[in-house]
Amino acid sequence: MANDIQIARKPPRHSFLTAGIAACILLLTAMPALAIGRPHARAAQAPVNLGTAASFGVLAGSTVTNTGPTVVKGDVGLSPGTAVTGFPPGTVTGTIHAADAVAAQAQSDLTAAYNDAATRGLAALVSGDLGGQTLTPGVYHSASSLGVTGTLTLDGQGDPNAVFIIQMGSTLTTASNSVVKLINRAQAANVFWQVGSSATLGTNSTFSGTILALTSITVTTGVKIFGRALARNGAVTLDTNVIIAEAGERTNIDGFPYLYNQTGAGGGLKVWVIGHHGSVPMTAPKIFCTDAATQAPCPDMNGTKTWPMPLNTQPLPLDTNSPGDIATTEVLQFVPDPSGTRIFYPAVTTTSFPGFPSGSVGAGCVDLQNQLNCAYTPLAALTNTPGQSNVNGLAGFVSVGTNLYGTTTSGQELCMSTATLTPCPGQPYASNTPPNTDRAGLGPRDFIGSKATVGGRVYTASNGPDSSTTSPHPPTLTCFDPGTKTSCAAWGVKVLGTAPGTYVATAVFPDYDTGGTAVGVCAVTGKFSTQKPTVNCYDFTGAVVTPPPGLADVFPSGGTGSVIFPPLNLTVGGGLRSYLPFYTQDNVYPGNTICYDWTVQAACPGFPSVNGHPSVNGGDTHDYGYVGTTACLYGTGDRRYLFDVDPVTGAGEC
């Protein structure tokens, strides 16, 4: 983590002569920037080492007082004082340390960090209100107070390690509804405010960075802090705030996200994550819920369990004491029911059901509004017969009308009515999808591939190049027509790549024209080599077409074992964009968002190429999928973190 980097401490200026020389240097350094109206500090800086104080969202010397349902994502500490009040109703995702050895050490480390930040130079001189200005990385100094009215922009200039240190001799005051905004990969973890006396953040303001205050910090009603409120000697006072000291939410499951707007008490946007892999024990916890507004775990409705929780085939509360009895699949694609309060997910279970005594694949169900399992619907029996293609797992789901569709490892097309919760008549249907992971003795196991619906048809990628498949084959793409319940006429089986190193095709999505109309389907195939992934596109007749300009170019080379999952499509800034998860198995690309704008047929303007998430687990996220709105994307991946991505700028906090 950046906060763990050791830095060289500069001695304080003791003499009048030294101070005078330093002041002259500071003034000369600042003059060019001040002449154009934009303070600019060019010297690259190491981050301030917070030591053990880095885990604290709130740390004070005398008291910590809270009013209202504040959420602190991180620890809360106090030393040498003993009075921490207001938790509850406030909640803390970490630990409250009141006058213990941990808090005392954190205060000692805070003092060292404060002194370090206060003696950094050379600095650009700033004064008064910083609102309306844009600052680039470096050190900024005011001998007296500073304020923020409106928006202060901190521009990382494309460097996720860019450091900002703002020094002030006395107070920091932000106005109501003010914003400290981060752009161009600036990270809140690398922004430090050294306050010579006390700080007050105005109501409903949004603040980024760590406050290192000599005396006290007052955080008024509705303030959201991406960073920390750390006071050396005085109090920290809170009132219905959100303080996010730790980037990303540790979910303890690797899986795929779903966004749900819960109604009623405690409602609002909730990000649900369901873990994947059919080979994971069915009793293992597989579902997690986070409140998007607070980035803290959702309250358990019954107040008895913590996330993650197991999933069940029976209609039981998620926090039941019954162990889980259901597993999921490789690429989790969800379908909501007509009411919008429940989702169906592709599932496999060895639990016996009438007609399926040895287990089945089918539709798992979760009632998100009420935190309940809803009844599982079996769709095809698990099989285990040597020498034939077996049902070990499934891919899916996608929807056409009120029906959902999946594919078994044996290549059959599954179908269920979401309106009646019953299998479609005559399913599973025959298709020309080549089986994969279908050998006997493997089940339950994942179908390696994914699905998409375009123009009322269902497209399926199937990857079967290894010995887990009865008839190994390169990645393929097929088409199923729900209207005829057969493979699409004249479409055939499309081979997506036969070159050495061809890996998996788990990203299938519509091919759009510049007006946002779907004109075909595309698939991206990863490589077990340092070559960039391959993009294949087809029109609705099955004819090969050239990928749109720039689409193939957005994927990088250089990493081995590239993986791309289905994108999230959103209209942002007037353009239809696809946000594609990307990583490589060798961690050359440890977790990145790739953005393609169909309207301009190029990489998304203003969004960094191969955008990483350096503030979350050191950037090691192994992205699987995104959900969200034009205001914020929420991502999950293999490394068991939930994280934010700004859909316009690619920044790490929305």
Image (cartoon, rainbow, N blue to C red):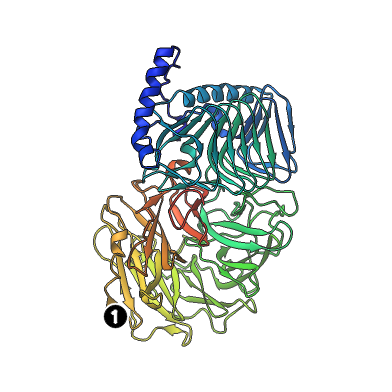
Task: Please indicate whether residue 413 sits to the left or right of residue 296 in the image.
Answer: left
Instruction: Please give left or right for residue 615 compared with residue 504 in the image.
Output: right
Looking at the picture, tell me which residue is in the foreground, 336 or 210.
210
Disc 1 residue crowd, few under 14, some 14–19, many 20+, Cα 10 Å: few
Instruction: Give how far across and how far down residue 222 sits, in percent.
Output: 66, 47
Is residue 234 depicted above or below 184 in this figure? Answer: above
Q: In this view, does 578 lie above or below 103?
A: below
- Please tell me which residue is depicted at 41% across the width and 50% down the height of the picture: 591
Query: Residue type at mark 1?
Result: Ala
Q: In this view, does 185 lie above or below 434?
A: above
Is residue 66 in sight in this rendering? yes
Residue 653: % across, % down:
50, 49
User: What is the quadrant of the N terminus in the image?
Assistant: top left
At x 45%, y 23%, the residue is 119
Image coordinates of residue 10 in percent, x first then y, are: 42, 19
Point out residue 421 in the picture as x, y percentages from the top left corner: 64, 76
